[in-house]
Image (tube, rainbow, N blue to C red):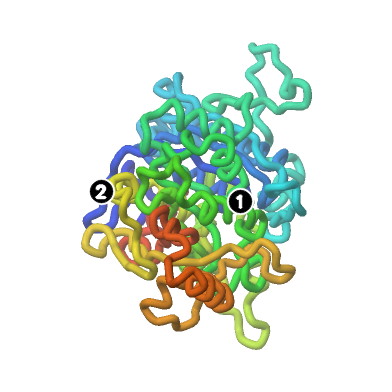
Amino acid sequence: MTSSTSEPSRDPPLAPGQKVEPVKLIIDTDPGVDDILSFILALSLPHVDLLALTLTFGNTTLDYARDNVLRLFGVLRKQYEASPEGSAERERWGRLFGPEARNRVIDLALGAEGPLGGRQRFTASYFHGRDGLSSVAFLKDDPFPLPVPPPMTGRSSEVEGTPYVPAPLRLSSSDSASTLLSHLRNNPPNTIRIAAIGPLTNLALAWQKDPHTFARVGLISVMGGALDVPGNTAPCSEFNTYADPWAAKVLFEEAVGHEALKEKRGQRLPIELLPLDITGRSTVPYKRLMSGGDKTPLSRFITSILAHPRQVTNSYAPSASSFDPAVHDLFQAHDPLAVAHACFASRSQAEGYHSAPSQDAVPNERRSEDEGRGWCYQERHFAVETEGTLTRGMCVVDRRAHGEEGEKKAKGKSRAEIVAEEEARQANGGAKIDESESATGTPGLVSVVTESPAEGKWFPDVFCWSLGC
């Protein structure tokens, strides 16, 4: 653990038995506050090569999402320039802005402006602020301005309404779905990981556009859903699945069994889901995150963008009891945990999706890496609700006791559907009607992350290390 007054370590803290392996990463994102903090985490890690940021609607609209990324990179450049030569901070951000970063490129792509099918769009400005960053864009004197081009370029800060995009960022001429596919196409199969920390619209569009290319992805760490805990945007729905449940359904259910996935385990996409069940437990005190105060460009930025989420979080404290900072003043690191998973999940875990095409996992099966010291997983079966007025985006888990044989038959179906299938089977002389599901995988069976390394104790330290707090 590092403090705001000491020189941070050059290398991230690791849990016992944890190993670091090179990672090529794309973050698909709706840049609100926790997304921005996730970028800092990924960019600070020496073993991670961030290839692209593909933007979607979600926490805010696309124009603010783009500007939030630009403001962050402006702050990080100032952090680099303010850091002493030879310091760990100078070395860390020199990988973005120093001489060694001359040929580095991070694509910035704009994607979906709303959910699949042009349905009603929602944003999370209630939590992240009007601009997605605690409304820092509207602060007096604009303390975190959009980057401007160097004077010698002769370029105005905006050309035809498009803000200046400084290196190493490169504004993509393609949309987010096409940018995702381009990187997957131009790299060896199974070598790129995607951290999906916004609505899944861009990923669903990429899958629908070119399933065979999208199937080259190595691992998809998805922040979304709520299985055994309440929702955060609606009583039973987490925001990302609420914002576009149709996209989640495409990836979790409709893609399963596609011919492009015949070489994958269970003929499904290599998705590992981090729902509110685990991200809601991955907390860091706001006081710790904001401990740097006004000391550096980065600490000033972090303190400012956390102001609105902290106010909202504190307002959730029960009025009938006294305010307890240890309970009520905690930042839930939803997106940073998913990015940490994409950056640190073992290579053997990811490769497991590409080495056993004839096998699928068993519902409720539990497993872990590194003899329980790494990430822990459980196979869960659920369906995503897309039509419910009150339950949009709900991950519907069948909690009825079917027994072992009934569990195999149910797979999320209603009892009426099961009875109808059995009656059809009897009418057919007892013959099985369709065995295609067992042959092509189980729709809605998803690997769910249930624990982070060191029983959750490692994550706050690596997260705070990246932020310098």
Which dot marks residue 19?
2
Q: Nearer the viewer, residue 230 or 133?
A: 230
Distance from Cα at disc 2 to Cα at disc 1: 33 Å
Q: Is residue 360 above or below residue 30?
A: below
Q: Nearer the viewer, residue 114 or 346?
A: 114
Residue at the location (73% across, 27% down)? 162
Residue type, label 1 = Ala
Identified at 72% across, 47% down, the residue is 117
Query: Mark 2 falls on what kind of element?
Result: loop
Residue 386, image x and y in percent? 66, 61
- Work out whether 464 lies above or below 208: below
Q: Quadrant of residue 95?
A: top left
In this view of the protein, can residue 207 be seen by the observer?
A: yes
Query: Which numbered marker is on residue 155?
Result: none
For the point 43% across and 51% down, the residue is 268
Element type at marker 1?
A: helix
Provide residue 130's location: percent of width, then percent of height: 75, 51
Q: Quadrant of the N terminus?
A: bottom left
Ranked by sequence position, the earlier of labels 2 and 1 is 2
Q: Nearer the viewer, residue 114 or 204?
A: 204
The foreground one among 273 and 460 is 273
Read off the residue under disc 1.
Answer: 247
Quarter assignment of residue 438: bottom left
Q: Is 202 rendered above or below residue 420? A: above
